[in-house]
Structures are given as C-alpha cells and as structure tokens.
Image (spheres, rainbow, N blue to C red):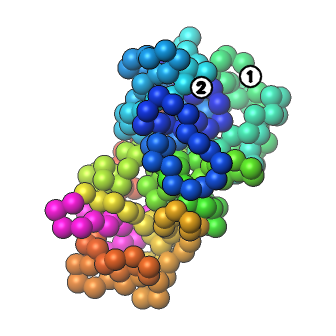
Amino acid sequence: MFSICQPVVDLRKKPEWVPCKDFSHQEQRDSQLLYAEPVHVVRREGEWCYVHALLQGHYPGWIHESELLALSKPYHPNLVVCSFQAKLDRTGMPLCYGTLLEGTPSGDVLLPNGQKDSLPASMVRCLPQNFNIPLLCQEARLFLDAPYLWGGCSSPAENKIQSVDCSGLVHLLYRAQALMLPRDAKDQVLKGYRVNKFLPADAIYLFKPQKPAHHVLLALDEQTCIESPRTGFKVRLLKLNQDFWLKAENLEVEGREPCHYVVKRFCNLPLNLSRAFV
C-alpha cells in the first residue's frame, strides 16, 4: 500500500506533468489526490506510476514516484481536516479540506511516515459515526466563490492551482462525512437511492437522454443548491425558480441547456471510508 506524501497532487491521464499556471481547462488532469490518500500501484513506467485511487472508487491515473510514500504499516484515519487554512504545526505542511489523518490518544496526529505532528483544534475534527447533514451543508458553503477547476478535488489555497469541479465538490464533502462516493458524476449517480424531491445533502445529476450523467448540483435546503459550474466560473448558490427550474422531467439552470435530471440520496448509506485503508 502507498499513500500520497504531498498536500495535493494531480492524477493524470498520461505519465507527464500537467501545466499548472492558471485555472484554465487542462484535459490531462483527471482528478486530484490529497496528503495521506491511499493508492494501489498497478504498474510503473520509469519514474511514473499508474495507480488506482482507493478513496475515489479505484479511479485510475498517473502520478510521479516522488509524490508517493510506501507504507510500512496500515494507516487508520479517524480525523478530517475541516478548514482551508490548516497547516501541520511542526513541519508547516499545508493540508486541504477533506484530508484524512490518524489521531492518537495523546492528541497528536500520526502521519503516514510514522512521525507525529499536531494541528490546531479548530482545523480538524473527528470523522462522524453518523452522517451529519447540517454539518455537510455548513461546510459546503466554505467553497463559495472558489474557482472551478477541471478535475479538481481539493480546497482552494492562495497561489495554488487547487479547487473543485462539480463532482469533486460532492466527493470531498461526503468524504468528510466518512462516506466514499465515486469520483465522477457518471459513477456517483449509480449509487444511493433515487428520490422524487430533493432535501438537504441530496445530489441532483444532469444528463442527456441515453447518455451518462455529466453534471451535479448539491442541495443545501429545499430551495437552494450549490454548484461548481464550469471553467471560468466560481462555486455559487442557485435558488429554485430564480436560478434553476424544474419542469416535468427537465431541469434548467441559468446559462446551461435544459437536461433530464435525477435526484440521489446518499446519507442513508453505511459509512464506508475505512474500507479504503485496509
């Protein structure tokens, strides 16, 4: 078993570096991996490793060997970073929202390399034993005004090419609730329970007839959704009958073609995060 040893790394389509100068569309970036995130190395080509991202439904892609740490023993996270400004006290390493860590009885954080560090109590919390809908909706609002990033699955940080796309936002928020969802909208929509009316924490997937889901909104209440729309835009709130409309089997979002939609509920699923670290 291996884990990521840097704050954020790109998961790439090909074994080559992704240009990271701005938030423009980079097709080469398929996703992002966070510090301590577990991966399975499938094969190597020189300095590059083809991996499966275990927290993201075995999502495949390429990372550089310098971004990997070989684990000497299993890692058992019980904490999650809940801030955009978190830094380890001793090493100063910045950590993204949604980063999973192993806390010790003494209050330290045990890192995957076996060293101990710490974090301010306000920037980390215990992984929940039960799904907490109000907390998910509260933490979702932290992402408001974050720039859309194709393949993004991290929290924004100053002078860093980090943020979320539509499904990355949903994935990270559910990860922080100890529930693993697949990485992409087309795979997320195959999980959970289909419902007719959305409630807080439900996900609304958009699709064309006979096509897989290509976009997702996340409900914060019965009238409001949060969305990471597309390149060049920022994460925003949408109000029912003001910014988006439900018409028969179609959903219309301002600035987007009408699409079919389906509402999925995940909060009743069993919390399954620990499976990725076995």
Residue 24, picture quadrant: bottom right
Query: In the shown orientation, is residue 43 left or right of residue 111?
Result: left
Query: In the shown orientation, is residue 213 left or right of residue 147?
Result: left
Residue 158 horizontal/vertical position (percent): 75, 52
Tell me: residue 71, above or below residue 102. above
Which residue bears the numbered disc 2?
Answer: 67
Front residue of 191/259: it is: 259
Mark 2, secondary structure of its residue:
helix
- Distance between the alpha carbons at the discs numbered 1 and 2: 20 Å
Residue under the point 74% across and 44% down: 86
Which residue bears the numbered disc 1?
Answer: 116
Tell me: residue 142, above or below residue 260. above
The tag on residue 39 is none
Residue 268 horizontal/vertical position (percent): 35, 54
Tell me: residue 69, above or below residue 267. above
Residue 187 horizontal/vertical position (percent): 31, 49
**Do we see residue 247 in this rendering?**
yes
Residue under the point 51% across and 55% down: 25
**Do we see residue 83 in this rendering?**
no
In magenta, the rendered stretch is 193-211
| Residue kind at label 2, given as amino acid type | Glu
Residue under the point 44% across and 17% down: 45
Residue 5 horizontal/vertical position (percent): 63, 26
For discs 1 and 2, the disc positioned in front in the rendered view:
2
| Residue kind at label 1, given as amino acid type | Lys
Image quarter hosting the C terminus: top left
Is 210 magenta? The answer is: yes
Tag 1 near tag 2, CB within 8 Å: no
Tell me: residue 152, above or below residue 107. below
Mark 1, secondary structure of its residue:
strand
Front residue of 67/247: it is: 67
Front residue of 87/163: it is: 163
